[in-house]
Amino acid sequence: MTQLDAAGAASISLYNYGHMRLKSLDWIAAALTRPKGQPMRHDNTVAIITGAGQGIGRAIAMQLAREGAAVGIVDIDEAGGRDTVERLNDTGAPAHFHYGDITDFAAVESAFAEIAAALGPVTLLVNNAAFTEAGSLETISLDGWHREININLNGTYHCTRAIV
């Protein structure tokens, strides 16, 4: 459900487990509604990005930092996650890495608590971590299928639930 808040900015509310408002969706709404050419700012924002040890997650982390956010990284790629944090710190951005497996809810809660203690209350979540086993229905292993569902579906649920 999209609505305008008191300042006239668009926000998106989800109705799932009661009424929740996720800042990550506010970020998307702001990107769609801000005047053309106006830079987006995330001052006073603490973001957690899963799977930011490389690729799209790293690019999102770097962009959020350029826009003023403090960035927490949760990833099972320890070397990649630490490298991303080092790159963020080199730009002067506050950042924190936590090695964590998003398929384990207790590990997610621990990671998010550690990041909040290091950077402040989390206000933005980017569920970026994902896994895909290449192949067709006939060639994808049952273990691969379960891993894909556990990371892409259950992991996203764990992170979203932990942040709400």
Image (cartoon, rainbow, N blue to C red):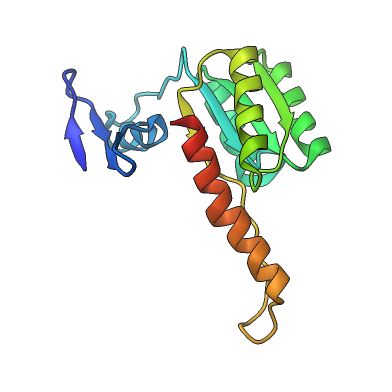
As drawn, is 144 to the left or to the right of 159? right
Residue 65 point in image, percent of width and height: 57, 22
Residue 91 screen position, x and y as percent: 68, 17
Determine whether, in the image, residue 126 is placed left or right of residue 2. right
Which one is nearer the viewer's eye here, 11 or 20?
Answer: 20
For residue 150, above or below residue 114:
below
Q: Which residue is drawn at 57% across and 55% down?
A: 152
Is residue 132 visible to the viewer in this orientation of the structure?
no
Q: How many marks?
A: 0
Name the image quarter holding residue 71: top right
Q: In this view, does 70 lie above or below 140?
A: above
The N terminus, quarter of image: top left
Please name whichever residue, 30 or 15, is drawn nearer the observer in this view of the structure. 15
Residue in the image at 77% along x and 23% along y: 86
Q: Where is residue 41 in the image (x, y as percent from the top left)?
A: 42, 20
> Is residue 86 in view from this perspective?
yes
Residue in front for this viewpoint, 140 or 7: 140
Q: Quadrant of the C terminus?
A: top left
Give the residue displayed 48% in from the left and 39% down from the top: 160
- Relative to 96, is 144 above or below? below
The residue sitting at the right extreme is 79
Q: Which quarter of the picture shows residue 109?
A: top right
**Location of residue 62 in the rendering, given as x and y in whole percent from the top left corner:** 61, 29
Nearer the observer, 148 or 71: 148
